[in-house]
Amino acid sequence: MSEEDNTAIVGRWFTEFWGADFRAVLGSVDGRRLQERSNPMNSNTDIVRDLARSTEATPDKLAELHSRLVAAAERDGILDVAYRVIDSPVGLLLVAATERGLVRVAYASEDHDAVLQNLAERISPRVRNAPARLDAVARELDEYFKRRRQRFDVLLDWQLSAGFRAVVLHHLPEIGYGHTASYSTVAQLAGNPTAVRAVGSACATNPLPVVVPCHRVVRADGGMGGYLGGIKAKRTLLTLEAAA
């Protein structure tokens, strides 16, 4: 779908909801700033907030508009990646999903804006803040952090992993809840006992941390080893599982 088609669809939604011409309202908003906000990978919420300055909308109406924009985007096929941000014991987690399943879990230390940009570049520029699409993921993460869930059942989209790294990540769920395995053990599970460094690289670039448990991979001497979410987050997850 072309940019012109997307603009026409958004214009129709806006006119239906507000009873005003979309382009006329845009003309009264700072053009340069709105152009930046209108980039496909930017949040619907940002666009709605800018438009509100010209419409004197109430917070309730803005929330309703946002929900209807997301629903319409799904209906008209211009929502390829949905995301939301979840608070957790290891900080704010950005979770994103495609129609195939959960495709990304990102720590705040990874820079959520950069993560969204990467999703737009590698999967689709049609990335939208659509919390309802991630309800099942949010629920399972909440149950996990409350020690009521030991494995995740949500569907996963593995498209951000490839080659030996993907092989390694697919084996990580074999490390049971509350247990750990060394990098060398995981290399053996993945079919290449000498690829210890490659296992470390796979864990360091895991697009689905927490759900795909790279935090359970430790050094052979018992040391924590590295972790893309930071050592504190890794220790928190291991402690949580050990206490269950």
Image (tube, rainbow, N blue to C red):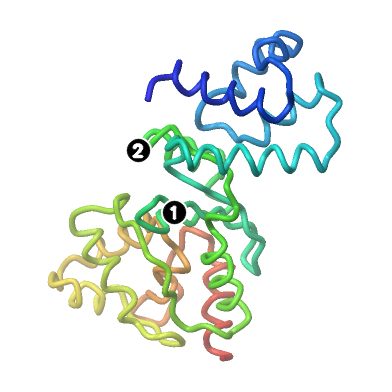
Q: Nearer the viewer, residue 45 or 85?
A: 45
Residue type beneath disc 2: Arg
Question: Quarter-wise, where is residue 49 in the image?
Answer: top right
Residue at 54% x, 75% y: name it: 237
Q: Nearer the viewer, residue 180 or 86?
A: 86
Q: Is residue 48 left or right of residue 176?
A: right
Q: Is residue 241 left or right of residue 221?
A: right
Residue at 23% x, 53% y: name it: 162
Q: Give above or below for 185 relative to 154.
A: below
Q: Is residue 42 left or right of residue 199?
A: right
Q: Position of residue 243 (x, y in %)?
A: 58, 90
The C terminus lies in quadrant: bottom right
Residue at 32% x, 63% y: name it: 200
Q: Position of residue 28 (x, y in %)?
A: 76, 10
Q: Nearer the viewer, residue 181 or 26?
A: 26
SS of the residue at dot 1?
A: strand
Q: Residue 122 has which mark? A: 2
Q: Give above or below for 150 relative to 109.
A: below
Residue at 58% x, 44% y: name it: 129
Residue type beneath disc 1: Arg
| Residue bearing the label numbered 1 | 104
